[in-house]
Image: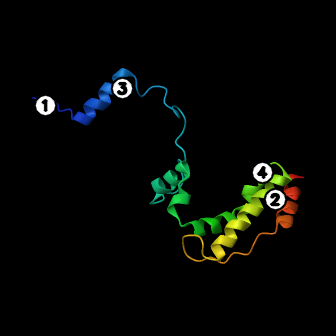
Amino acid sequence: MVHWYESSIDRQLREAAERGEFENLPGAGKPLRDAGREYEEDWWVKDWLQREGATSGVIPPTLALRRETEDLTAKVDRLRTEREVRDYVAELNGRIRKATVGLMDGPPVVLPPVDADDVVAGWRERRA
């Protein structure tokens, strides 16, 4: 005699499938993202951080500022006008000054101010 047992989770999944709640989901019929890549132990944490844009809340503001200065070229390349580039550099330099004198949370960082003229010149070259 065969005994059949359905847990409450299995029952909920079966009922949801019968109602059609799993049909037409985003990504249906598409390959899994990152399929075939090497396994990373904390892949789900990195995926969540990237998906939610949560890195600003996870690392201290001073370290986030350091990362932002390292990624300056990528950020500036998304801006459309020279005025936007100059405004962004001015705002970034203001935050660098705050971090340098200890007005931001996190470990101390020593970052030189960014030269707006150099950033604009590089921005123009990459746009040409």
Q: Tell me which label, 2 or 3, sits earlier in the chain.
A: 3
Q: Which residue is mark 4?
A: 79
Q: Residue at x 45, y 59 (%)?
A: 42
Front in this rendered view, residue 99 or 18: 99
Image mark for residue 67: none
Q: What amino acid type should be assigned to the residue bearing mark 3?
A: Ala
At numbered mark 2, what does the secondary structure look like: helix, strand or loop? helix
Indicate the position of residue 22 as horizontal and vertical percent values.
42, 28
The residue mark sitting in front, 1 or 4, is 4
Q: Tell me which label, 2 or 1, sits earlier in the chain.
A: 1
Question: Is residue 123 left or right of 62 when viewed as pictured?
Answer: right
Q: Tell me which label, 2 or 4, sits earlier in the chain.
A: 4
At numbered mark 4, what does the secondary structure look like: helix, strand or loop? loop
Q: Tell me which label, 1 or 3, sits earlier in the chain.
A: 1
Q: Residue at x 72, y 56 (%)?
A: 75
Q: What amino acid type should be assigned to the residue bearing mark 2?
A: Arg
Q: Residue at x 40, y 26 (%)?
A: 21
Q: Tell me which label, 1 or 4, sits earlier in the chain.
A: 1
Q: Tell me which label, 3 or 4, sits earlier in the chain.
A: 3
Viewer can see residue 30: yes
Are there few (<14), some (14-19), or many (20+) residues within 10 Å of tag 2?
some
Identify the image quadrant of residue 125. bottom right
Q: What amino acid type should be assigned to the residue bearing mark 1?
A: His
Image mark for residue 17: 3
Q: Please report contact status of discs 2 and 4: CB closer than 8 Å, yes or no.
A: no
Q: What amino acid type should be assigned to the residue bearing mark 4?
A: Leu
Q: CA distance from mark 2 to mark 4?
A: 10 Å
The residue mark sitting in front, 3 or 4, is 4
Image mark for residue 86: 2
Are there few (<14), some (14-19), or many (20+) residues within 10 Å of tag 3?
few
Q: Which residue is mark 1?
A: 3
Q: CA distance from mark 2 to mark 1?
A: 72 Å
